[in-house]
Image (cartoon, helix red, strand yellow):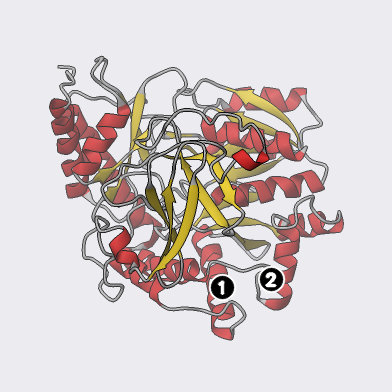
Amino acid sequence: MGVPSGQKGGWAGPDRRYLHTLGCYNILPCKGSPFWSGPSPRPKDQSDRGVWGGRASPAFSVPFFGRRGALYIDYKTRPRHPEAVACWKETPMSSLYPTLAPLPDPAEAPAAPSHWLLTPGPLTTTATVKRAMLHDWGSWDGDFRALTASLRRRLLEIAGVGEGYSVVPLQGSGTFALEAALLSLAQRNSRVLIIVNGAYGQRMVEISRRIGLGHAVLDLAETEAPSPDALAQRLAAAPDLTHVAVAQVETSTGLLNPVEALAQVTAAAGRKLLVDAVSAFGALWLDPARVPFETLIFSTNKCLEGVPGMGFVLTRIEALEEARACGPAPSLALDLADQWAYMERTGLFRFTPPTHVLAAFRQALDEYDAEGGRTARLARYRRNHDALVAGMGWAGLRPLLPEALRSPIIVTFLAPEDPAYHFTTFYEVMKRRGFIIYPGKMTEVESFRLGCIGAVDVPVMEDCARACEAAFKELGVALPD
């Protein structure tokens, strides 16, 4: 919604009313705006209400957008008897927001982004990945079906699994795919032990609680890795547990959980393993010969460096068949087994897929292969991590976790212990300097996070470290010696 030229903003959702006589919305000023004139007095009778409910206010115009221009509601008020007069103006949309920067020419993807996204996803993508989204696809078209099938095959190859597995794509983020996978466990009357040492483990607990999946929790500190011995004891004490669920990288801190050791304990106990590999798949490999998992969850926009919009569940075909035999899931859109069966039968998605996301993902996988696959991708991320930690160390800032627990995906840094430090202002200064960063997700320690993944390399990480040091100096934040 626009604001008249020369006026300040200040609209509020609760102040919306209907202009029934005009058939459109009237946006009322909120407290603190230049148009606020105090609370609306209760009208004496219906005839005294007017279109503003009795409120007196200065005259001004509000544009309502249309296809060819803007409908302006001109308010000419007198105490307790406001009137509204609508007039149509053939006004170019660009003139309503003269301060907005024009969109870039879609035919010319920039060589370098306007900001580096040092986040765990969405993340910085290459110009060629962006350019791959310029083509429109029909979701029922044979070419798009072939594209989808080829992506599913390539993901199985990246995972290194055999014929007993299938990849099921699901529209949405990695969390959508994670919830669909947990729903399939609920269909099978499973009971899962969830390892929690951060926000993403806790997310699995919350999903399980909401969908009615039987679960127990192995609760750990945010800086603590799970012990295989503790897992073995917990499984031995609870024979009703059928599955173990763990995040490969606990992205709230960057902690790398020892999934291989946990998988071997799980298999030895006769249980099955579900891994949230969203922040790891494509770089931190889980060798199926050494990590006997049932299910992996991942997405387009992490280590495979695509754009957001599609999650994937890689799981055993027998698990999908078992879930399907148990009947429909309690969610239509997130019914993993139904999505798989329909896709196997038709090659189509049940509901509209993000076609441009998958086109970009094909390009991202081409670039992944050209770089050298997971070995080269992981090596670059490790170089990024090492350069970032070294550069931040020169500024006196240290990581939260010891090196033995850190992943090369994202690093949590302890915030300066200075009253002048506020993440919001630090974020804005970093954004102005060309970097988008993440706040910390620690519950007890003030921190911030810097990602090492995406289409970035060592010079970007070094520039980020220098920008952090300069930002703190600009804000008057004292750094440790």
Give the tally of numbered discs: 2
Circle 2 packing at 10 Å, graded few (<14), some (14-19), many (20+), is some
The amino acid at mark 2 is Met
The location of residue 278, given as percent across then percent down, is 51, 48
| Left or right: 158, with 196 as reference point | left
The residue sitting at 60% across, 57% down in the picture is 21
Is residue 274 at least partly visible in the picture? yes
The residue sitting at 66% across, 76% down in the picture is 347
Q: Is residue 381 above or below residue 437?
A: below
Q: Residue furthest bottom?
A: 142
The location of residue 157, given as percent across then percent down, is 52, 65
The residue that disc 1 covers is 148
Residue 327 in which image quadrant:
bottom right
The residue that disc 2 covers is 343
The amino acid at mark 1 is Thr
Q: Is residue 432 above or below residue 367?
A: above
Question: In terms of depth relative to the viewer, which is nearer, 89 or 351?
Answer: 89
Instruction: Tell me the SS state at disc 2.
Output: helix
Q: Residue furthest right?
A: 326
The residue sitting at 16% across, 43% down in the picture is 463
| Left or right: 263, with 237 as reference point | left
Q: Are marks 2 and 1 in contact (CB under 8 Å)?
A: yes
